[in-house]
Amino acid sequence: MSDAIKSRVKKILSLNIPADIDLRDLRDDTPLLDYGVGADSVSRLELLVALEEEFGVGLDEGGITPDFFETVDNISDYISRKFSFSS
């Protein structure tokens, strides 16, 4: 998976993480729940919609498991595999 995808995912996450958290502290394998990302169904839906808009794809909510929301790596890997993005 490319760093470009991870950068785009982090850009989306920056809009979903409380302002007092420095995005530079967010590693690719950091549990996102620690930052409140995907903590409830509303925040998960908002994140999915933002990712769909950023990548121009449709994400099937029924096919997304809780693992999807665990880390930047998981989100980026899913998008890369599902939609064959390389950048």
Image (spheres, rainbow, N blue to C red):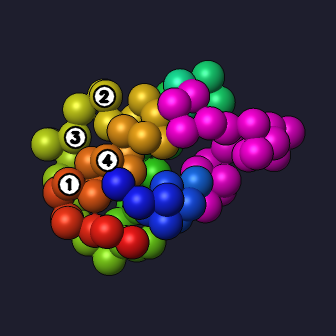
Q: Nearer the viewer, mark 4 or mark 2?
A: 4
* Residue at x 65% of width, y 56% of height: 15
**Where is mark 2, residue-wise?**
66
SS at circle 4: helix
Amino acid at circle 4: Asp
In the picture of the structure, the residue carrying the numbered disc 3 is: 64
Question: How far across and down, in percent of the image, does residue 4 sit?
Answer: 49, 66
Q: CA distance from mark 4 to mark 2?
A: 14 Å
Give the residue pinned by disc 4.
77
Q: Which mark is residue 68?
A: none
Q: Residues within 10 Å of mark 1 (few under 14, many from 20)?
A: few
Residue span colored magenta: 11-30
Q: CA distance from mark 4 to mark 3?
A: 13 Å
Farthest-out residue, right: 20
Magenta portion: prevailing SS class: loop
Q: Nearer the viewer, mark 4 or mark 3?
A: 4
From this view, report whether residue 45 is shown above or below residue 70.
below
Asked if residue 47 lies in the magenta stretch, the reply is no
The location of residue 73, given as percent across then percent down, is 43, 41
Disc 1 residue type?
A: Arg
Give the SS element for disc 3.
loop
Circle 2 sits in a helix, a strand or a loop, which is it? helix
Res 73 visible: yes
Residue 79 drawn at (x, y percent): 29, 56
Q: Are marks 4 and 3 in contact (CB under 8 Å)?
A: no
Q: Which residue is mark 1?
A: 81
Please say if the residues under marks 1 and 4 sit with CB atoms less than 8 Å apart.
yes
